[in-house]
Amino acid sequence: MSFQSLGLRAELIRAVSEKGYSVPTPIQRQAIPPILEGRDIMAGAQTGTGKTAGFTLPLLQRLISTDKPTTGKPGKNRRTIRALVLTPTRELAAQVSESVQTYGKYLPLKSAVIFGGVKISPQIQKLRNGVDILVATPGRLLDHVDQNTVNLSTVDILVLDEADRMLDMGFIRDIRKLLARLPRQKQTLFFSATFSNEIKQLANELLTSPVLIEVAQRNAAADRVTQIVHPVDRHRKRELLSYLIGSKNWKQVLVFTRTKHGADRLSEQLTHDGIKAAAIHGNKSQGARTKALADFKAGKARVLVATDIAARGLDINQLPHVVNYELPNTPEDYIHRIGRTGRAGNEGEAMSLVCVDELKLLQDIERLLKRDISRVVINDFEPDLSIKPEPINRGRGRQQQAARKPAAKPVGKNATSARNNSAQNNQRSSFKGRSNNQGRSQNRARHNAQGAR
């Protein structure tokens, strides 16, 4: 099947062809025709499936086919917002906006993107000039609504992209406030990687006889991503990471940490080791986040250290390696992390540096995947099995609370404690029983020298 067979206009086909695409992905094949028909859709799609083009292309065609760009007082040739795309993060908003501009380059439609972390005045001026398509994060868009600098009453098409993440980040109240400003009659395109009860309830409120699309098994890891666990003591993780990057001559690595402070510290340590690194997280200014991502894409930084929220929506072409320096607090976030690699038909590799403290988190991930992840012990980095685990600080933030799943029903009042103790007591089988050793000939001094290159 080709893009032409989906019924897209010549201008869109030309833009897609210039991007080097000729065959639509499964989500594009299933989503584009019903969107062109004006149907609501509810799509379950993991990252890297091509869903952004899956809604951007038909959205552009719907708007140009029913073109009505002007409104207002006589002599005012001002466009009104006819399509609104809501995303959970600044990076994803920027990515979607870039797709709109890329695929719509041969169409007379105007678009804008608004998000927090930057000055609001230039955004207000863009809105005053008029746009057809607005891409926004909920918080900043609500700021514009409160200041009466945006009019959402003319929206014909609403897209909720990564709705599950927006709810995890605590945006549900903002979203409901924004929905109250939108027309009741509109086309709604709903995308989510997972479907919790809260997500289903929101979808039921928004969608009318939707077309259901599921292109990947729920919470399934990317098929083209090789997953490996490297057991290691917690205090030697940075040393092992430097060794892996140096000895394997990795040129582009996305590394995940659990905290913002941890991301900054690891970035500084890697740079001290001679490996140029940059950090990206929520406390960074938008300018700093944009520069870090640009340097990483351009090869000026070999390593981008990121937290989960900052990395959501990052689209890096042919990213070969993802490293979980620390496992995420929720197993679903592991799926999103490794989904940064193995995209658009490319192969990818995801490694997790796991210490004894994280065995319970690893077991949760494997339970979600319904399979074990291969353990590979790196020579001279074998974990000390006498080290006792320390409790992981899972945090009390809004995101963690929203994303945390309810615990299984206990058999007795101490069942949960018993399960945790069992996981810790089984550390020998978890780390040792399924491990493979590689290259006994290396020595630690050589490791350190290579890792510091």
Image: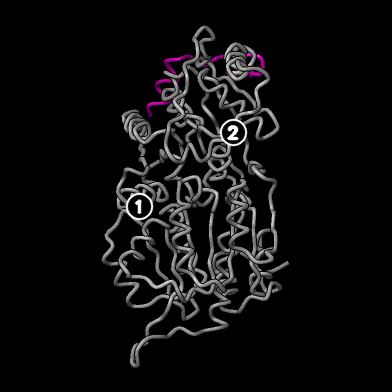
Residue 263 horizontal/vertical position (percent) = 37, 34
Q: Is residue 37 above or below residue 288?
A: below
Distance in Å between CA atoms under marks 1 and 2: 36 Å
In this picture, which residue range is highlighted in magenta? Answer: 431-453
Residue 149 horizontal/vertical position (percent) = 32, 70
Q: Looking at the image, can residue 139 be seen? A: yes
Q: Which mark is residue 187?
A: none
Q: Is residue 90 left or right of residue 123?
A: right
Q: Which mark is residue 406?
A: 2
| Amino acid type of the residue tagged 1 in the rendering | Thr
Residue 366 belongs to magenta span: no
Most distant residue in the front direction: 413
Q: Residues within 10 Å of mark 2 (few under 14, many from 20)?
A: few
Residue drawn where x is 59% and y is 60% of the image: 205
Viewer-nearest residue: 267 or 211: 211
Residue 434 belongs to magenta span: yes
Residue 351 horizontal/vertical position (percent) = 55, 32
Question: Label 1, on which residue?
Answer: 290
Q: Is residue 371 above or below residue 389?
A: below
SS category of the residue bearing label 2: loop
